[in-house]
Image (cartoon, grey):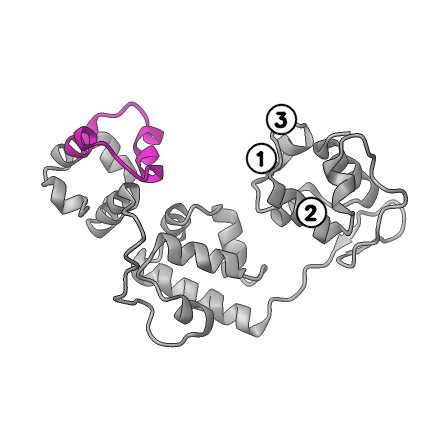
Amino acid sequence: MTFGEKLTHYRTQTGVPQTVLADLLDLSLPTYKKLERSQRRASAAEVAQFAQWSGIPLSFLTDDAQALPDPLPVTPDIHRIPRGRPAKVVTPDVSFQGKRIAFRVRQLIDQRFDGSARDFAEAVFINETLLSRYLNGKREISDRLLLKIVRLLPDISIAWLRSGAGTMTTNVTPVDKPCHDGQQLFDYLTSKGLFWVDLQEAMGLSSLSSATEYKKRGTIRHETRQRIADALKVEVGDIFSC
């Protein structure tokens, strides 16, 4: 029994909706469904996350030769209700501190991304629906996400995000952090009020995804840098500083 088959079995036995399990694993619903159909391999972190939440020993989930335990462990977050009605999933309240962190993330979006949650989600590689849950107080913002934000936006203060101490930005830039060409390009477009579709049109690219693909690249070749700069009618150094 594969991990995907075990997820399906767990869901059908407990009545937990696919949307809840997808949210638990930080996956979009289509991606989660691929897990159940064994069309996508689960990462070790995803298996461990499900094991911790469900109470099922990790050995049962990683060994295809083993079926899930019977009966299944009772998960504190799930309350079975009378037969014929769906299970009720209770989402724990976000703490006061968590709400303050969400408020500061919203401030960051307002000041750095002109209020565009979509642009922010794209910049830090997070699902936009999941981001909405964080900002609306439906899910606690994890420390892992805060660390991801400051790793991709190195001038943002982790102390400010966590507790509000100091200012939003810091002038200290880690010397061992390599340049990310895709991020520099994104920052330039944002500063000029441009979007990826503008880059697509300027470069004559066949699809929008061809333009957004640059965002993922840590290193963009010199020839491609020059093509981008020529298309935007600026110097290479205006976009890429290193």
Q: Name the magenta segment's main secondary structure.
A: helix
Q: Quadrant of residue 7?
A: top right
Badge 3: residue crowd in 10 Å (few <14, some 14–19, many ≥20): few
Task: Pick the residue in front: 218 or 216.
Answer: 218
Question: What is the C-alpha distance between the residues marked 3 and 2?
Answer: 18 Å
Residue type for callout 2: Phe
Res. 31 mark: 1
Residue type for callout 3: Gln
Q: Residue furthest bottom?
A: 165
Of the image marks 3 and 2, the number of the one nearer the N terminus: 3
Do tag 1 and tag 2 residues touch (Cβ < 8 Å)? no
Of the image marks 3 and 1, the number of the one nearer the N terminus: 1
Classify the position of the N terminus by image quarter: top right
Residue corresponding to mark 2: 50
Residue type for callout 1: Thr
Q: Residue 142 appears at what percent x and percent y?
A: 54, 60
Residue appearing at x 30%, y 48% in the figure: 178
Q: Residue 237 appears at what percent x and percent y?
A: 12, 44
Magenta extent: 202-228
Q: Element type at marker 2? A: helix
Q: Is residue 226 left or right of residue 100?
A: left
Q: Is residue 104 left or right of residue 79?
A: left
Residue appearing at x 34%, y 55% in the figure: 153
Residue corresponding to mark 3: 39
Question: What is the C-alpha distance between the residues marked 1 and 2?
Answer: 15 Å
Task: Pick the residue in front: 164 or 129.
Answer: 164
Exactly how many numbered labels are in the figure?
Answer: 3
Question: What is the C-alpha distance between the residues marked 3 and 1?
Answer: 9 Å
Q: Residue 239 appears at what percent x and percent y?
A: 17, 44
